[in-house]
Amino acid sequence: MDNKDLNTNIANQLDALAVSLNNTAKSVREGSLSLTSGPESQLERGKVIKAARGVIDAIKQPADEFIEWLTVLGPMTALRLFLKWKVFENIPTADNTNISYQELADKVGGDVQLIIRLAWVLVSAGLLKQVGTDRVAHTPKSVAYATAAPNPVKALACITYDEFMPAFSAMPKFFTETGLKEPTGRLNTAYAYGQGQPGATVWEIMGQDKERMGNFMMAMGDLTQNWPFLGTYDLSWAVSHVDDKDEDGGQRALLVDVGGSRGHAIKAIIEATPGLPASRCVLEDLPEVVDAVKKSADPDLGEVRLVGMDFHAEQPVKGALVYFVRRCLHDYGDDACVEILKRLTDAMAPDSRLLIVEQVMSNPPSVFAAGTDLVMLSIGGKERTLDNFRDITGRAGLQILQVAQNPGADGALIECAKN
């Protein structure tokens, strides 16, 4: 393609993207679309970001890639340092207020030139605003970092730098030493290598620092809160089984939330499924997690049966109608997932169903899915395509009956039965 044809192609791409962005702007003005609130806002923002990125990609040349990476890594580093030093908290947040760099440096106990140079990185990225030549102010984007109390935005910034970046940086040496093969276990990972603790699991490493673990749990909770628990899948059919008995003649468990943490999913499912008795539902997780749930005395879990277990071991609840696993399998490689699934297959009755809620990647995947898969690669886990899920479920003696895809996103619910 000659230069003229190349430019024509770029112009055509820009025209198409402009139409898409103009249509979105029209919908926002008319009030039929929100980019700031509501359950669909995150999805819609993602569409706009993708289109805007498309404009950049259409005109970007190979040499521009390095500049873009630099403009990401620099602000990420400055942001983490300013969070650690509580710089954002010392910039006034009231409208039309600012602070001199010298006063800010004095407040945090730092050298003024150091604070200026790092602030300039964030000013150039649009996160902070410089006033004149020697003062700085918040922008609407930076105010979220100014609270003394933890919040999901601060937590996500911290884990990106503290957990993900060391793992990514370690990958060249890690794969040189281990060979060019997909990590599959929980012990020999780029994450542990990057943290200087080879042979330890991600949870063992994070568990050494309560603040880091707290940041991780808060950030992950925020990222997944918009993921549907059931999505478009209709579980109302389970209510017709309220009279079912188990093999001992007792009441059959209708729903078992495997690895369900503190019960946010099981509570939402019970609320969304009228007629599903909480007393016939089971919440399972590691014993220490279940103990914490018991101590919390959550009234919404008062009738739910709480069971401490490890899903790598035998499933203690046999013959339940529905087993539910949400956002657990991506933490593990294929072989480990097959073993986890086999534990469930062994416990299932012929009419039992297994519901798996995970990110189901397209091929090729979206930017977000590919990015999260790289994170999972660093800890020995894996995001999967539907073909990948067919492989691991098939090896575990299961067949996929249907896939309830979350509209416009990678999240989906996969319904499985025993072969």
Image: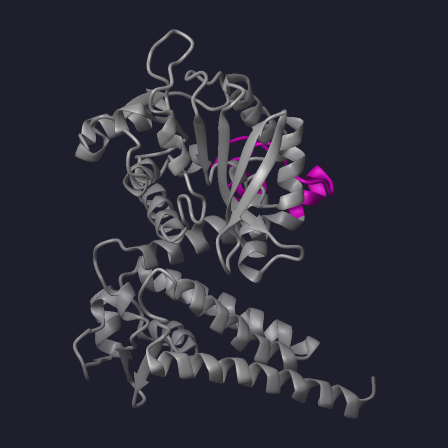
Q: Which residue occupies the foreground of this view, 162 or 346? A: 346
Looking at the picture, does residue 378 appear above or below residue 11? above
323 over 156 or under it: above or below? above
Residue 228 image position (x, y, % from top left): 40, 49
The residue lying at 39 percent from left, 27 percent from top is 256
Q: Quadrant of the C terminus?
A: top right
Pinpoint residue 289: horizontal percent, then vertical percent: 32, 28
Q: Nearer the viewer, residue 104 or 109?
A: 104
| 270 sits to left or right of 234 | left
Quarter containing the N terminus: bottom right
Seen in the picture, residue 290 relative to 362 is either above or below; the reply is above
| Color encoding of the figure | one colour
Identify the residue at horizontal 41%, vertical 38% (top origin). Answer: 235
Q: Is residue 300 magenta?
A: no
Main SS class of the magenta portion in the image: loop
- Compared with residue 280, is residue 186 higher up or lower down, i.e. above or below? below
Residue 243 visible, this angle? yes
**Residue drawn where x is 30% and y is 35% of the image:** 262
In this rendering, the count of numbered labels is 0
- Residue at x 21%, y 68% (from the top left corner): 90
In the rendered image, residue 320, in percent from the top left (x then y), is placed at: 43, 21
Q: Is residue 183 magenta?
A: yes
Front residue of this view, candidates 265 and 253: 253
Q: Which residues are magenta?
A: 173-202
Q: Is residue 167 visible?
A: no
Residue that extends furthest to the bottom in the rendered view of this protein: 4
The answer to which image quadrant residue 15 occupies is: bottom right
Q: Give percent across and percent down for residue 358.
A: 50, 44
